[in-house]
Image (tube, rainbow, N blue to C red):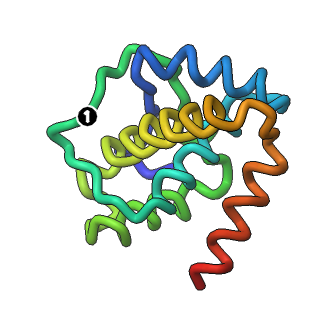
Amino acid sequence: MLPMLRSIKTSEKNRELVAELTAKLGFGPENLIARIAFAYSISQDRRLHLSDIKDSKGKEYSGSVLFGDYLPVYIALICQHYDLPKFDYDVPKYIKMHIDDGLSLISDVMKTNPNLNLFDFVLELTDKGLEDL
């Protein structure tokens, strides 16, 4: 694990969303919704601003629990997106922001599509990504 990524905490508001979305979408560990949220946020191709970072009073994940063996890949995504070196002090902040952002975005999608399940959600996102290519 990279030394600067010991743990990531969602915002207090998103602590509830993690549990709610995990239950609604029907899959096990809560770190899965955080991974999907991160990927969904990054896929929107927006640059978040550090001045907009939310509190860190929510769900806490260690880097290894959050991303497993793929931690370097997630860090590389942030570094590529923001043109940062992998040991930049702000990498964990951007990861946290994209998880919080993705959780909010997924929650909004679920509110407008209450019958959408995880499989359909991921399939829809995959199809959109392939169309964009």
Q: What residue do we see at 40% from left, 22% from top?
A: 11
Query: In screen coordinates, is 91 left or right of 37?
Result: left
Q: Nearer the viewer, residue 133 or 33?
A: 133
x, y percent for residue 126: 71, 66
Q: Residue furthest front?
A: 112
Q: Nearer the viewer, residue 57 or 132?
A: 132
The quadrant in which the C terminus is found is: bottom right
Q: Which residue is mark 1?
A: 53
Q: What residue do we see at 53% from left, 35% from top?
A: 103
Q: Residue furthest left?
A: 51
Q: Residue furthest bottom?
A: 133
Query: In screen coordinates, is 109 left or right of 92?
Result: right
Query: In screen coordinates, is 61 left or right of 55?
Result: right
Q: Amino acid at mark 1?
A: Ile
Q: What residue do we see at 29% from left, 58% from top?
A: 47
Q: Residues within 10 Å of mark 1 (few under 14, many from 20)?
A: some
Q: Quadrant of residue 117?
A: top right
Count up the numbered dots. 1
Q: Quadrant of residue 76?
A: bottom left
Secondary structure under the numbered disc 1 in the rendered image: loop
Q: What residue do we see at 44% from left, 32% from top?
A: 8
x, y percent for residue 102: 50, 42
Q: Is residue 45 above or below residue 88?
A: below
x, y percent for residue 90: 25, 48
